[in-house]
């Protein structure tokens, strides 16, 4: 089928594009940048339309011309605390434009890349030491501006799902790591270091540099490799039957500690220098975002489980970086 991917040149989008191509779909990317560095290997197989999802007319014209059966909405603005107005314009307004454009073009389905952020900061049993898995029907408790925009975007999707023929679905990812993350998010002041820890732990040793963190090795999080994220998106895009739910967690369902992750890296990259101290809250965040998402719904409906455990993911990631492709 023909699929339009917004934000298809970014970290997640580039792997989503590859997965869709591997499944035999025709892929067009709607992006506000022309930087093809994360999709060099497949650039000649995608149609790139440069535009801004905040420009409703431009987006509607592009999507109508492409006539997709499905739109995967990946584009987002991440630096939300620093610039809340842009965050709302891109993540909420832009999402409304994407849904409207998809409906006008006669698309069947919109798949939205949502986030664990809708569950908000981790408190009580959701956090250390229980890390009780959070299900899709549990309370959403957005607090930061990123959380707020992802939650509002889901609600916008649900509205279009109720009032048009579009089938709208939100996939809520747990903490994603993989090639492209440092390049895209490593530079975000204050925030970037926190969200790119796992990628730094692999990319620094891959280039012979040490990774040092004086505390946080006992903190646990639900980690998902970007190829599993892309596979889940590809599966939901390709599902022939109507979807049973409006939201799905896409996660490992496991609480992996930073120390365990470092151990897996050492097994794959024996000369890696990783110095991770004990304790919690490695990045001294004011509020915890470490949590575990219950992935049962994806498994029950699609038989889907992640296929990359940390060791397999680290091996793939390491080879990717060594080949000079990150
Ligand atoms: N990275 C994670 O850990 C994570 C976790 C959960 C959910 N998500 C979600 O996954 C999605 C993709 O995240 P990512 O990490 O790949 O980010 P990214 O920044 O690498 O990719 C987003 C892409 O969207 C494009 N874009 C941004 N604003 C645009 C606009 N106005 N018009 C057109 N294109 C625009 C950017 O150029 C970029 O290529 C986001 O919706 C994010 O909220 C990411």
Image: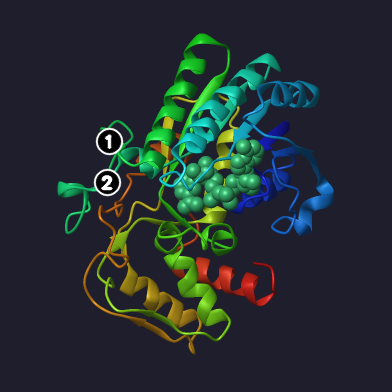
Would residue 129 be found to the left or right of residue 47 on screen? Answer: left
Asked whether 50 or 166 is in front, the reply is: 50
Question: Residue at 48% of width from left, 32% of height from top?
Answer: 88
Task: State the SS at label 1.
Answer: loop
Q: Relative to residue 97, is residue 186 depicted above or below?
A: below
Q: CB of mark 2 within 8 Å of CB of mark 1?
A: yes
Would residue 142 be found to the left or right of residue 98 on screen? Answer: left
Q: Position of residue 128 (x, y in %)?
A: 19, 58
Q: CA distance from mark 2 to mark 1?
A: 7 Å
Question: Residue at 32% of width from left, 74% of height from top?
Answer: 259
Query: Circle 2 is placed at which residue position?
Result: 121
Question: Residue at 50% of width from left, 74% of height from top?
Answer: 202
Would residue 264 be found to the left or right of residue 46 on screen? Answer: left
Would residue 99 be found to the left or right of residue 275 on screen? Answer: right
Q: Classify 10 Å Cα crowding around label 2: few (below 14), some (14-19), many (20 and above).
A: many
Q: Residue furthest bottom?
A: 271
Q: Quadrant of the C terminus?
A: bottom right
Q: Residue furthest right?
A: 44
Query: Circle 1 is placed at which residue position?
Result: 141
Q: Relative to residue 88, is residue 294 depicted above or below?
A: below
Q: Position of residue 28 (x, y in %)?
A: 75, 37
Question: Residue at 16% of width from left, 48% of height from top?
Answer: 125
Residue 45 visible, this orientation: yes
Q: Classify 10 Å Cα crowding around label 1: few (below 14), some (14-19), many (20 and above).
A: some
């Amino acid at each position: 089928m023909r699929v339009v991917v917004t934000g298809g040149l970014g970290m997640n989008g580039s792997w989503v594009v590859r997965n869709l191509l591997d499944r035999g779909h025709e892929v067009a990317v709607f992006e506000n940048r022309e930087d093809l560095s994360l999709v060099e290997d497949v650039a000649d197989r995608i149609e790139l339309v440069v535009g801004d999802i905040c420009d409703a007319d431009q987006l509607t014209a592009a999507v109508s011309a492409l006539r997709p059966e499905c739109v995967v909405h990946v584009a987002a603005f991440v630096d939300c605390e620093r610039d809340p107005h842009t965050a709302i314009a891109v993540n909420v307004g832009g999402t409304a434009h994407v849904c409207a454009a998809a409906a006008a073009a006669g698309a069947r389905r919109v798949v939205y890349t949502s986030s664990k952020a809708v569950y908000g900061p981790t408190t009580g049993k959701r956090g250390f030491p229980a890390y009780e898995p959070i299900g899709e029907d549990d309370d959403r408790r957005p607090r930061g501006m990123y959380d707020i925009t992802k939650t509002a975007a889901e609600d916008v999707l649900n509205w279009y799902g109720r009032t048009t023929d579009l089938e709208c679905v939100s996939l809520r990812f747990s903490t994603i790591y993989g090639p492209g993350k440092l390049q895209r998010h490593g530079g975000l002041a204050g925030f970037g270091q926190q969200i790119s820890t796992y990628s730094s732990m692999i990319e620094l040793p891959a280039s012979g540099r040490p990774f040092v963190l004086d505390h946080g090795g006992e903190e646990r999080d639900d980690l998902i490799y970007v190829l599993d994220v892309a596979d889940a998106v590809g599966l939901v895009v390709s599902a022939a039957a109507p979807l049973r739910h409006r939201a799905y967690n896409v996660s490992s369902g496991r609480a992996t500690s930073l120390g365990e992750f470092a151990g897996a890296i050492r097994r794959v990259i024996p000369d890696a220098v990783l110095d991770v101290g004990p304790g919690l809250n490695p990045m001294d965040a004011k509020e915890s975002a470490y949590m575990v998402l219950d992935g049962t719904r994806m498994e029950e409906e699609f038989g889907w489980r992640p296929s990359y455990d940390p060791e397999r993911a680290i091996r793939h990631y390491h080879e990717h970086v060594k080949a000079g492709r990150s």
